[in-house]
Each structure stands twice: as structure tokens, then as C-alpha cells.
């Protein structure tokens, strides 16, 4: 009997110990769950049509007798298709084959330059973008891409020159304005802020992207920005694309303000959208790598230690 | 009680109009009521196939199909563009200018006459699909389920021509040759969804058309009050009045270089394809 009473007391004690201390706490399902309020993109499914186009292009190349110039064009076009579905290595291989067969296609050098920037091979990237502009001085995107190469190479003055050239070609484009701000911020944050404010007047108020500028200017909060990107949405693809951009620029915001942990999460979210052909998606990977490198160099003991 | 129910119905009707409307900056354009439609279509109801007779033609086809795939403005279309897997040996010398430029439907011109007009040789046609031929010498036009595009054609023109595969008619002032095919009366399920005809003297509301979008037109035109502004004068004759839906708005069907596709047109285009109302050989 004494043993029974003892065991009942023990059971009750254990049961009480397992009961939550705060009896008034709501069940987990009713709690204000942060993840429920987070807008996460549904990762885009890799385009069935793009994959089919690659297969058809391969078949066309096999079935057709091509001159070197034509074969170079086919390698270039297939490289762009591979790039659009995130197959970087295959794309790079095709670009290098194209340049061997016909060394005067400006777009090929531009694509090689982007790939070299993403690999951190900045000298090769500069050479490629210089070749693009030498062949075709009006190839606007080479200025953007060379600006980004210099930016990630921390040669901010050079980068600013190129992004100014790119910005001058279309002063209504939010993304040109934002990159110009991000580059300028590394040289003079205050001047960058006032230039951003001036540049905003060139953008249409109806464009949703103007909210990104508003966020950087401090006119709206992060929650406002994330709420506004749902306005006038037409489909899921558009949401993924917008989120890719917003996450990336939020990542840049926190990265530049010494909050690497927050920045890394935003870059990961940008990558999770699978919008492979967006500049923001490409550079989110590089940003993450750079943040990881700086983290590991902080942890690494110095020689003096 | 009856009054309050009527008032409630009026409020609901106003709310419905507000929900399904397209607002335009231009004056005199009425609100258009249309049922909801899928903004992003992932299926391939029709698969127009490119045909090329040169590598430069192939590169053009590839460019157009890449732009089509990434164009979110056209994501509502359940269409998949097929690329060629080899070079064809067709030849379209076009020594004489084709009699018609665009929008001639398969039913309007018999096959024999069709080939005669386009003056193409060795065309390999797939009976189950629509064909897009890239050629060196032509501009851009559609005959039945065949589209002919020059290598210098723009993407916007390609989209404009693609709409003709779903029987959409031109909205600019048409020449006589085009009128003959696009202003056919009585209308049937193969007629243009963006044109609607009423026999002269018929009561507007009473006239029953076989056209699947007649009700949509009637609702929209009736809402405008005065229909005269919507008269399509090119097609109108002594016996029929023809109407277009958006006379004051420059749409992609009015000019090739305009990208604006009104939502009501998106709805109609998708509905045409889903109902199988598109050109085939």
C-alpha cells in the first residue's frame, strides 16, 4: 500500500513537472506565429518550356550543317537558355565555345564577364566587359555589369563612373537608381542619400518599385514595403519576381548596415525564389559567399595570436 | 421591402462592376464587365510551331519564343511555342504582294487559293497545329492557321499576329480585301470575338447572335448608353451595324507596336482557346 501511494505521488510529480508552467499560455496554433506573417515566395518551377527549347535547340544543332559563325551563335543562344534555368556551368561552357568560334559577338563577352564576376575573377571580368564595349560601345548592360564587377572588387570610384553611365541612359529605372545608390553609399553615404532623393523624382509614382527607394530613404518601414509589394499583383510568377528583388535589396540594406545575420537570411530568401534570370538572384549567391567569408575571417585567429 | 431588395441588388451590381472593371485614362471609354480569368496559364492548349528555312530565321524564331516565354503580360495565354528541330526547304518568293495582309481566317479562303496567294512552295504543314513561317521577304500576316513573319519583325507584331490565330480581327480601318473576310455576317463561332454585328432595325437587346461573346458585348455596349461611338464604320453596311468594343483605346490590335492588351481581351483570348475556337489547318 505504502508502495502504491509512493508511486502515485511520483506519477503526479512527474505529470506536474511536464505541465507548462504558464497555464494561461495559448496553444501553439493560437500564438501569434511570426512565420505566418512572413511573405515567402513559392519557388518558381523550372520552366518546362525553357527546358523543351534547350532540347529542341540541341536537336536543331545535330540536324543542321553549320558554319563556324552559325555554330558560335548557337552556342551563345544555348548558353543564354542554360543561364535562364540556372545551369551556370553549362552556360559558361557554351559561351567559351562561342568565343572560340567567333570572337566578335559582344553579348558573349558580356555573359562571360558576368560569370567571371560571380566567380570572383575580376580581372577576367573587366577584360570581357572591355571587349564587349570595344565591339559595341552602345551595349548598355556592359556598363552595369562592369560597375558590379568593380563594386564587388571594392573599386568603388570606377564602379560609380560606370553606373552613372548606365543610369544616364534611363533615369526612370528604379534598379539603375538603386545600384547607383548602393555603389555611392560605399564612398559617401550622405551624398548617396541626397542623390537618391533627387533621383526619385524621375520615377513614376505608380511604379511599385518606387517603394524600394522610399524604404532606403527611410520614408516607409520594412513592413510597409513588404505589404505594398502585393498591390496590383497579377500572378504567382510576378510575386516570386518581386520578392526576389525585395529580399535582395533588403539583404543589401542590412549588409551595408553591419547586420550580416539578417542580411544573410534575406539573401537566402532571394535565392529561394528560383528567379534565375534576375540580376538580384545571381548576386544574392555572391553576397552570401562574401558574408560567409567575412564571418570566417573574423573567427580566424590572427598571426599575432 | 421590395424597394430595399431592389436597392440591395443595385448595390451588389455596382460592387460587381467595380470588381470586374478596367479603368482607362482616356475619356469616353466605358467600363467593361468581364468574367474572371486565369492570369497565369501553364497548360498548352495550342502549340504554334515555328518553321525556318535558314539559320538566321532560326535565330529569329528563338528570339521570339524566348521573349514570349518571359513576357508576364502574355502569361495568361495557354499557348506553347514550338521551335523547329531542322531547317525546312520551303520557299516564299512573294513575287506579287499578297492580296491580304492579316487576319484572313481559314474558313474565308479555300486551301488552294491560300497557297496561291502566299506563293510558298514545299510547306510542310502539321494538321494538328498552327504554323509560323519565318521568311526573308515578307512582312507579317496570318492566313488561316499559317503565320508569315519576316526576320526583321518585332515581338509586338508577333503577339498581334498571334491574336489572329484566335480569330481576333484588326481594329484599324480595313481595306476592302480584309473587310470581305472579317465582316462576315451572320456571325458564328468562328467570327472575330472583338467585333459584333446587329442587323439594322433590330432591337439592340433582343437580337440574338450565335457569337459566344455577344452577351458580353451587349452588356458593355448597353452600359455605355450611346452606342454610336462604338460603331465600326468599316464593316457597317446598309443592312448591319457593326461594333468594336474599345474605340477610344489604342490596343495591340489597333497598332502593332502597342503592347496594351485590355483585360477583357485577355479574358476573350483565353476563352477562345479553351473553347477550341482557334485556327487549325
Image: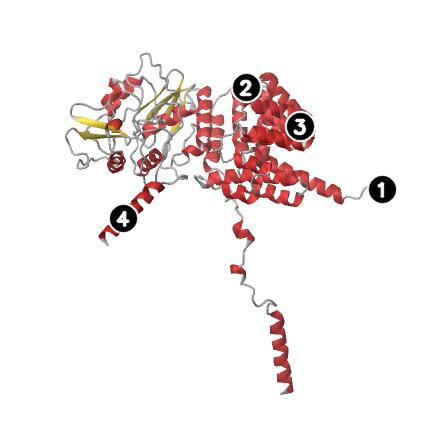
A250 lies left or right of B222 = right
Task: Let me know if marks 4 and 1 both belong to one chain.
Answer: no
Distance CA(mark 2)–CA(mark 4): 75 Å
The chain to which mark 1 is attached is A
User: Which residue, given by chain and number where applicable, does mark 4 sit on?
Assistant: B7
Q: Which disc, if any, is residue A150?
A: 3
- Output the chain of dot 4: B
Return the residue at label 2: A68
Q: Nearer the viewer, mark 4 or mark 3?
A: 4
Q: Marks 1/2: CA distance?
A: 58 Å
Compute the Cα span from label 2 to label 3. Answer: 33 Å
Q: Nearer the viewer, mark 2 or mark 4?
A: 4
Q: CA distance from mark 4 to mark 1?
A: 85 Å
Q: Are marks 4 and 1 in contact (CB under 8 Å)?
A: no
- Are tags 4 and 3 found on a single chain? no
Q: Secondary structure at mark 1?
A: loop
Query: Please, what secondary structure does the residue beneath circle 2 have?
Result: helix
- In the current view of this chain or complex, which residue is farthest to the top? B95
Chain to which the residue tagged by mark 2 belongs:
A
Dot 2 or dot 3: first in sequence order is: 2
Q: Chain of mark 3?
A: A
Amino acid at each position: 500500500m505504502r508502495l502504491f501511494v509512493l508511486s502515485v505521488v511520483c506519477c503526479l510529480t512527474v505529470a506536474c513537472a511536464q505541465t507548462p508552467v504558464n497555464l494561461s499560455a495559448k496553444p501553439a496554433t493560437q500564438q501569434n506565429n511570426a512565420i505566418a506573417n512572413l511573405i515567402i515566395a513559392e519557388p518558381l518551377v523550372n520552366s518546362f518550356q525553357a527546358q523543351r527549347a534547350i532540347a529542341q535547340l540541341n536537336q536543331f544543332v545535330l540536324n543542321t550543317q553549320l558554319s563556324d559563325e552559325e555554330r558560335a551563335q548557337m552556342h551563345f543562344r544555348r548558353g543564354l537558355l542554360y543561364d535562364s534555368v540556372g545551369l551556370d556551368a553549362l552556360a559558361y561552357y557554351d559561351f567559351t565555345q562561342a568565343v572560340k568560334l567567333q570572337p566578335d559577338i559582344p553579348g558573349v563577352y558580356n555573359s562571360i564577364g558576368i560569370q567571371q564576376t560571380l566567380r570572383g575573377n575580376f580581372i577576367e571580368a573587366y577584360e570581357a566587359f572591355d571587349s564587349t564595349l570595344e565591339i559595341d560601345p552602345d551595349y548598355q548592360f556592359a556598363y552595369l555589369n562592369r560597375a558590379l564587377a568593380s563594386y564587388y572588387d571594392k573599386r568603388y570610384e570606377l564602379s560609380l563612373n560606370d553606373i552613372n553611365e548606365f543610369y544616364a541612359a534611363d533615369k526612370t529605372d528604379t534598379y539603375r537608381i538603386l545600384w547607383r545608390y548602393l555603389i555611392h553609399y560605399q564612398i559617401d553615404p550622405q551624398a548617396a542619400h541626397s542623390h537618391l532623393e533627387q533621383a526619385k523624382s524621375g520615377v513614376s509614382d505608380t511604379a511599385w518599385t518606387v517603394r524600394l527607394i522610399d524604404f532606403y530613404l527611410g520614408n516607409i518601414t520594412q513592413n510597409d514595403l513588404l505589404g505594398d509589394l502585393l498591390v496590383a499583383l497579377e500572378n504567382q510568377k510576378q510575386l516570386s519576381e518581386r520578392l526576389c528583388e525585395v529580399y535582395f535589396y533588403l539583404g543589401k540594406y542590412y549588409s551595408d548596415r553591419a547586420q550580416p545575420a539578417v542580411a544573410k537570411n534575406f539573401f537566402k530568401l532571394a535565392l529561394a525564389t528560383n528567379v534565375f534570370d534576375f540580376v538580384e538572384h545571381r548576386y544574392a549567391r555572391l553576397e552570401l559567399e562574401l558574408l560567409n567569408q567575412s564571418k570566417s575571417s573574423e573567427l580566424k585567429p590572427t598571426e599575432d595570436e | 421591402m421590395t424597394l430595399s431588395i431592389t436597392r440591395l441588388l443595385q448595390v451588389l451590381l455596382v460592387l460587381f462592376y467595380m470588381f470586374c472593371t478596367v479603368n482607362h485614362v482616356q475619356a469616353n471609354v466605358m467600363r467593361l464587365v468581364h468574367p474572371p480569368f486565369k492570369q497565369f496559364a501553364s497548360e498548352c492548349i495550342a502549340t504554334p510551331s515555328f518553321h525556318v528555312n535558314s539559320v538566321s530565321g532560326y535565330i529569329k524564331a528563338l528570339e521570339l519564343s524566348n521573349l514570349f516565354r518571359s513576357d508576364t503580360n502574355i502569361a495568361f495565354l495557354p499557348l506553347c511555342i514550338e521551335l523547329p528541330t531542322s531547317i525546312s526547304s520551303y520557299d516564299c518568293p512573294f513575287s506579287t504582294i499578297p492580296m491580304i495582309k492579316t487576319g484572313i481566317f481559314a474558313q474565308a479562303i479555300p486551301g488552294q487559293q491560300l497557297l496561291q496567294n502566299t506563293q510558298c512552295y514545299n510547306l510542310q504543314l502539321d494538321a494538328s497545329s498552327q504554323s509560323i513561317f519565318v521568311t526573308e521577304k515578307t512582312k507579317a500576316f496570318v492566313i488561316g492557321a499559317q503565320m508569315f513573319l519576316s526576320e526583321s519583325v518585332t515581338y509586338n507584331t508577333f503577339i498581334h499576329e498571334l491574336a489572329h490565330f484566335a480569330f481576333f480581327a484588326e481594329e484599324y480601318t480595313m481595306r476592302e480585301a480584309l473587310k470581305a473576310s472579317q465582316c462576315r455576317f451572320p456571325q458564328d463561332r468562328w467570327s472575330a470575338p472583338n467585333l459584333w454585328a446587329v442587323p439594322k432595325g433590330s432591337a439592340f437587346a433582343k437580337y440574338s447572335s450565335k457569337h459566344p461573346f455577344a452577351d458580353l458585348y451587349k452588356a458593355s455596349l448597353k452600359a455605355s448608353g450611346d452606342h454610336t461611338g462604338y460603331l465600326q464604320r468599316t464593316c457597317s453596311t446598309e443592312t448591319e451595324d457593326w461594333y468594336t468594343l474599345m474605340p477610344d483605346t489604342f490596343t495591340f490590335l489597333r497598332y502593332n507596336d502597342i503592347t496594351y492588351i485590355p483585360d477583357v481581351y485577355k479574358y476573350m483570348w483565353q476563352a477562345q482557346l479553351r473553347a477550341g475556337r482557334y485556327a487549325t489547318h
